[in-house]
Amino acid sequence: MKLKIIITSILIPTLILLGGCAIASSAAKVEISCDQFQDSHHSRNEIELGVGDTVTIDLCSNPTTGFQWEENPDISDSTILEQASHEFIPAGTDVPGQAGREVWVFKTLKKGVSTVSFKYSRPWEGGEKGEWTYTLTVTVK
């Protein structure tokens, strides 16, 4: 009887912990610097995630040049991938004209493939469009 209680007291917490590991989501991050965009104005990546995972996309941005990333990038299938947040993070210095970062977080909703595409443009009429582009293909398994 004591052996049964000991085994049960060890087995139940272990199963609970393992169950928590199985449903835990993970997070991925993609970061593209200004130097990388200077080398190649158009970048692409692919990533595999699970359902409920998040991916953070961190792109160089310098609004003092008149350029900005679209706040709501194009998502090819919004039933698979949704935008959770977007923010601009200024440079850590007080030097005028320093590039900051724009950061988006996306969450996976179900299995499938979706792409998210970003364009860095001067948004006014006649301004340069798609000077830099970034596309991420997300495969959710």
Image (cartoon, rainbow, N blue to C red):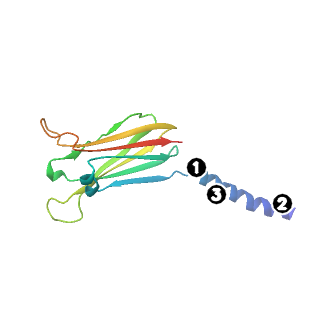
Cα–Cα span, label 2 and label 1: 28 Å
Element under disc 1: helix
The x and y percentages for residue 2 are 85, 64
Structural crowding at the residue carrying mark 2, measured as other residues with C-alpha within 10 Å and reported as few (<14), some (14–19) or many (≥20): few
Decide if residue 60 is in sight here. no
Quadrant of res 93: bottom left
Q: Which residue position is annotated with label 3? A: 17
Q: Which residue position is annotated with label 2? A: 4
Decide if residue 37 is in sight here. yes
The x and y percentages for residue 94 are 17, 65
Please, which residue is most extreme toward the right here? 1
The x and y percentages for residue 110 are 51, 38
Q: Which residue position is annotated with label 1? A: 23
Q: Nearer the viewer, mark 2 or mark 1?
A: 1
Quadrant of res 32: bottom left
Amino acid type indicated by mark 1: Ile
Closer to the chain start, of discs 2 and 1, is 2
